[in-house]
Amino acid sequence: MNVAVAIPDLQPEVLIPAAEGPAPKRIVVAYGFWLFLLSDIVMFAALFAAYAVLKDGTAGGPTGAQLFNQVTVAIETACLLVSSYTCGMMSLAVNSRRRLTTYFFAAITFALGAAFLGLELREFAIMIADGAAPQRSAFLSAFFTLVGCHGLHVSVGLTWLVVMMAQVATRGFAPSVERRLLCFALFWHALDIIWIGVFTVVYLMGVIQ
Amino acid sequence: MTVTRYDRAPGDTSPPAEAQAGEAAGVLVYSIGLLLAVILTAVSFWVANTSLLWGPGVPLGLAVLAIAQMGVHLVFFLHITTGPDSTNNVLALAWGVLIVLLVMAGSLWIMANLNANMVMSPELMNLHMQH
């Protein structure tokens, strides 16, 4: 059966494809990765909501105020913030194709990220040794899920950074390598944004109550 | 002939053509961001530990400081700006913020409502669960 469809008079410019064609791959890739990061942040929002709902369910176990060490949190925060800055410096070095500067700032970023992860694992180990393991209470389950998920992202980021430096070493600043470095920088900055939520909602608000 | 205007890739300091020239400006942008972030973080830690401020207002103050710092990171580190070449990035961000607000506010609201409607008060329930 033929169906005749009346096509209304469309504005001519709607039908003519853009003369310049689709956007360059760099922009499309970075935009797609930006969408992924936003959905990752939505996942973290669910974990934050679970933590906020369960934080008073201590079941007689230790509370946040008894467990959290603000000095450790401050050092972790400083590590991640400065590593975000050095990651930005690395992006600038990549843009101007300076390989040694890229390695230099990547190394600092990696060292600070590793220091953050080491402090976090040490904190987890001390808590578990003190009987504050994830299975102790709903509060601790939510705490380890939220903070552990962020820590897992940081370790993925560190692995990614090592892989990217190996690619820069073997392939130079090829367009594909440059796109991945842009995505890595977005990922690393987004992790720092999530950490702002973690140190505010979990640690600082946990200490004042 | 109109000038080709693509959206800016999120994370890009400037359009690729200006990348070479904008190195010093790029360092300045990241440095301003770092300075603002350090100030906001320090104020957050001070607010949580001082006894000078009215107690019940402290969590709200911390939330405001955290949101401000997230804004600083978005603008100075991720370079999500209000420029016409960043419209798609900002719209995607707005969608993300909407979902985050719905998930968090919705969960807290529903769970607080359920708690309020329980026969046993939340404190009693927590006590009850310990035995």
Image (cartoon, helix red, strand yellow):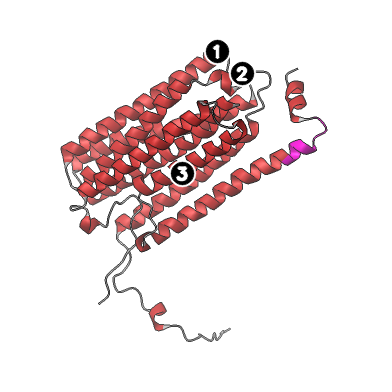
Q: Quadrant of the N terminus of chain A?
A: bottom right
| Residue at the disc numbered 2 | A62
Residue A205 % position (x, y): 56, 30
| Mark with earlier residue (2, 1) | 2
Give whichever of A179, B124 is nearer the camera.
B124
Q: Disc 1 vs disc 3: which is toward the camera? A: 3
In the image, are marks 2 and 1 on the same chain? yes
Residue A168 % position (x, y): 21, 40
Task: Name which quarter of the figure residue A81 lies in.
Answer: top left
Question: Type of residue at label 1?
Answer: Asp
| Residue at the disc numbered 3 | B68
Give whichever of A173, A63 is nearer the camera.
A63
In the image, are marks 1 and 3 on the same chain? no
What's the magenta region? Answer: B113-120
Q: Is residue A84 above or below residue A118?
A: below
Q: CA distance from mark 2 to mark 1?
A: 10 Å
Tell whether A45 sits left or right of A190: right
Q: Disc 2 vs disc 1: which is toward the camera? A: 2
| Residue at the disc numbered 1 | A130
Secondary structure under the numbered disc 1 in the rendered image = loop
